[in-house]
Image: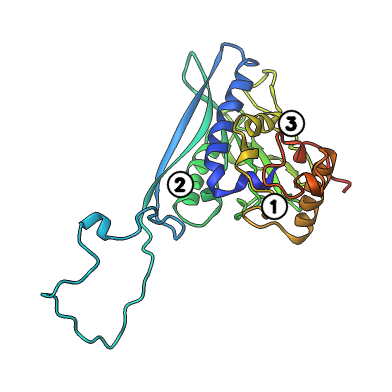
Amino acid sequence: MNPYLENPELWSAVHNRLIVAIADDLVDRLSEKYRFEIEKRTYFSSDTESVLVGISDVAVLTGRTAEPTSSIVTLSLSVQPQKVTVPIAEEANERYLEIREVATGIVVTTIELLSPKNKRSGEGRIAYERKRNQVLTTTTHLVEIDLLGGGKPFPIKSENLGDYRILICRGESPSETLRERRPTGELYAFSLRQPIPPVPIPLSVGEVEPILDLQPLLNRVYEKGRYHLAIDYTQPPQPPLSEADSHIVSGCIGCVWRAKGMGEQRGWGRKNAFSHNQLYTTDLSRT
């Protein structure tokens, strides 16, 4: 995973592109018994990170001048006001995938790609948890993809949650109780140093499960979105990495620059040093 793609200014577009890429990749390997639907979850977020931006002064809205007129009497105040930022609720839209049976319209599998708001305390997490719990109480399979190093992971009983993770919770026979159906899930945990592992996408019982290989899809999103033109690799990624991972990323960036012949005289430290996702396509687990 390229941690620079997690930047809040980039992730929303990366998320939407990757959702479409997943659907386009899988649909060709599904029988015509199934179809994909891109659904949208909408909520209003009013956490401290959702603030009004782009309007520098209230006078822009009211048309008033900043200069006081002679008719205004200014009183001496014992407590001086301070400039503050007032968070406001903003509409948030998050897209996810559903695999449905054409004949019945039944949702067989839900594929969720987590967003930063899902992993922070606030309405984004509450809205996603509500949807997650709703799916887990049905026979619908859940595929939950977490490519975000920041934020708080959802509760999973595992000794190794990794830096990133893909969770598959299977909804089996309708005759089974919830306890019988949902005691365990399949967790694919991986680190910053490892490629994203391919995972099976569960369908109806007895059907061949297509394999979702996210790594080449993410690489293609990186290329088509020209994120090498948007990312400044001379700066640390946001949110910040651990010290150990920061050293790994810095070393990888240096290796790629040297491999591309970008020495000190030819732009060492250039912000747009990469025209592809080579930095994160190889297994660095032995680094």
Drawn side of residue 175 relative to residue 63, left or right: right
Q: Residue at x 80, y 47 (%)?
A: 265
Q: Is residue 55 above or below residue 189?
A: below
- Residue on which disc 2 sits: 127
Circles 3, 1 touching at the beta carbon (< 8 Å): no
Neighbour class for label 2 at 10 Å: few (<14), some, many (≥20)? some
Q: Give how far across and how far down residue 235 sits, in percent.
A: 67, 54
| Residue 98 screen position, x and y as percent | 52, 27
Q: Identify the residue position indicated by label 3 in the image.
A: 198
Q: Which residue is mark 1?
A: 234
Quick one: label 1 or label 2, which is nearer the N terminus?
2
Disc with the residue nearer the chain's start (2 vs 3): 2
Q: Along the polypeptide, which appears first: circle 3 or circle 1?
A: 3
Q: Work out whether 261 lies above or below 117.
A: above
At 63% across and 47% down in the image, what residue appears? 148
Horizontal side of 65 relative to 225 (left or right) equals: left
Query: In terms of image quadrants, where is residue 65?
Result: bottom left
Q: CA distance from mark 1 to mark 2?
A: 36 Å
- Secondary structure at badge 1 equals loop
Write the residue at 59% across / 48% down.
7
**Contact (CB < 8 A) between labels 1 and 2?**
no
User: Does residue 139 appear in the picture of this structure?
Assistant: no
